[in-house]
């Protein structure tokens, strides 16, 4: 009751006048005149979402606009390029947000309500609204194959395991990046497999990036450890496992610039801390001339895992031999069997907390249309 007696409107009006901005009370009153009276004047959910959206846009303005020499995601390469059709003038924009290339693909697994995603150029965001992983190739002369700055072909593989495959090539270098999900010891892992080849040799690079397809996402600390398995420890919580020890691991903070500028340096430290939240790190693996090299990275998704599970993992192991999709279907033709499985795959991966039979038996009508 006491708060009702406080002069909120007077305080807000005085504050708006003091800082030279529009009076929000008067603006809201004008806005309400365009519609009929209702119980809810403004959609609070949309206002909340808009505040979060543009708050990140303000951070993007500071981080991206003044550091265009960094390697940025695909949407920045397009939206900030005046010669591209996706270019948006930024002179009168108070926030810079991704509004032209909001298309990315998530990969899932039954029983796991976590969805690592890949953008149209192979940038992998393993956790919800988190930092990302990217893969590059750098030859001995310093020429770089960076997928976000080149054309790529992306495809979906929906066989026994769901995969997103991104392929990129230029100037005698080729790079393939795959994203899938594995379940080990009742925990989920986002698995990134990268294959690289360079005619002149060089480096296959796996790098941690402080952004995702929405914009900046802070990395304040990175530590490389080599115990039973080599891994990065990101923000003192998430582990990023490598399948073998890199030839060198480089680090950089915001004051030193992007880690790609140090590609020819030798390793001098095993960790980095950045108060700005723009720490970067890269693991370098030698590429012999003309020979393909593979590297596998697994990100522990414990941070996004729920406390309870519904037992799908055991059902999958019993009913479909560990496949990502139960596939014991009886249809009249191979064609109808294929389309039936495609229809059910989104169902299995989008409702992890709902129980379904571990085997599905479908009898078609003979016309090719699933029953």
Image (tube, rainbow, N blue to C red):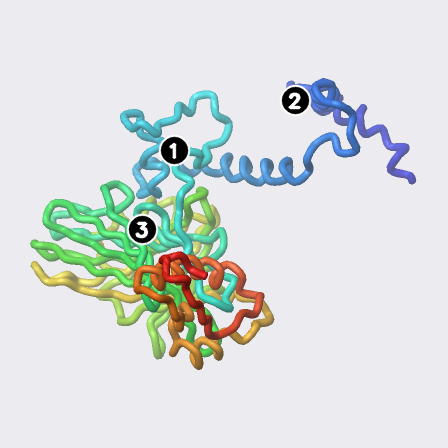
Above-or-below relation of 20 to 132: above
Tell me whether the residue at label 1 lies in contact with that at label 3, contact meaning CB atoms closer than 8 angstroms.
no
Query: Residue at point 51% right, 40% down?
Result: 56
Above-or-below relation of 330 to 121: below
Q: Check the image and name the residue furthest to the front.
A: 366
Nearest to N terminus: mark 1 or mark 3: 1
Residue marked by disc 2? 19
Question: For the residue labelled by badge 2, is the local secondary structure a helix, a strand or a loop?
Answer: loop
Q: Residue 26's x, y, as percent?
A: 73, 19
Position of residue 205 in the picture relative to residue 105 (left or right): left
The crowding category of the residue bearing disc 2, from other C-alpha atoms within 10 Å (few below 14, some 14 to 19, many at least 20), is few
Real-space Cα separation, disc 2 to disc 1, in angstroms: 26 Å
Residue marked by disc 3? 122
Between disc 1 and disc 3, the foreground one is 3
Quadrant including the N terminus: top right
Query: Residue at point 56% right, 72% down?
Result: 309
Which one is in front, 283 or 109?
Answer: 109
Q: Residue 198's x, y, as percent?
A: 12, 55
Which one is in front, 5 or 321?
Answer: 321
Question: For the residue labelled by badge 1, is the local secondary structure a helix, a strand or a loop?
Answer: loop
Res 97 seen here: yes
Nearest to N terminus: mark 3 or mark 2: 2
- Quarter holding residue 295: bottom left
Q: Residue 40's x, y, as percent?
A: 75, 34
Using the image, tell me which numbered label, if any, was put on residue 66.
1
Position of residue 83 in the picture relative to residue 288 (left or right): right
């Amino acid at each position: 009751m006491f708060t009702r007696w406080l002069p909120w409107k007077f305080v807000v009006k005085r504050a708006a006048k003091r800082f030279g901005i529009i009076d929000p009370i008067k603006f809201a009153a004008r806005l309400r005149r365009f519609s009929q009276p209702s119980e809810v004047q403004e959609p609070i959910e949309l206002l909340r979402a808009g505040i979060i959206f543009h708050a990140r846009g303000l951070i993007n303005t500071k981080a991206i606009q003044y550091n265009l020499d960094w390697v940025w995601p695909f949407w920045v390469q397009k939206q900030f390029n005046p010669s591209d059709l996706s270019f948006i003038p930024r002179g009168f924009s108070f926030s810079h947000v991704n509004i032209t290339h909001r298309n990315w693909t998530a990969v899932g697994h039954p029983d796991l309500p976590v969805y690592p995603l890949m953008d149209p150029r192979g940038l992998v965001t393993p956790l919800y609204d988190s930092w990302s992983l990217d893969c590059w190739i750098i030859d001995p002369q310093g020429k770089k194959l960076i997928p976000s700055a080149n054309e790529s072909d992306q495809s979906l593989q929906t066989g026994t395991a769901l995969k997103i495959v991104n392929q990129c090539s230029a100037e005698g270098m080729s790079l393939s990046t795959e994203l899938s999900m594995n379940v080990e010891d009742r925990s989920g892992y986002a698995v990134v497999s990268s294959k690289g080849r360079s005619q002149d040799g060089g480096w296959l690079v796996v790098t941690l990036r402080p952004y995702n397809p929405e914009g900046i996402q802070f990395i304040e600390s990175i530590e490389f450890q080599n115990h039973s398995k080599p891994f990065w420890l990101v923000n003192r919580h998430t582990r990023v496992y490598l399948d073998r020890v890199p030839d060198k691991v480089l680090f950089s903070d915001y004051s030193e610039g992007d880690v790609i500028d140090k590609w020819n340096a030798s390793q001098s430290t095993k960790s980095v801390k950045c108060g700005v939240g723009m720490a970067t790190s890269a693991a370098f693996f030698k590429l012999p001339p003309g020979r393909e090299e593979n590297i596998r990275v697994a990100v522990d998704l414990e941070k996004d895992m729920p406390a309870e599970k519904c037992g799908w993992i055991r059902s999958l192991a019993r009913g479909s031999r560990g496949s990502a999709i139960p596939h014991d279907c009886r249809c009249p033709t191979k064609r109808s069997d294929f389309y039936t499985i495609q229809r059910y795959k989104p169902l299995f991966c989008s409702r992890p907390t709902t129980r379904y039979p571990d085997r599905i038996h479908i009898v078609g009508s003979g016309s090719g249309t699933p029953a």
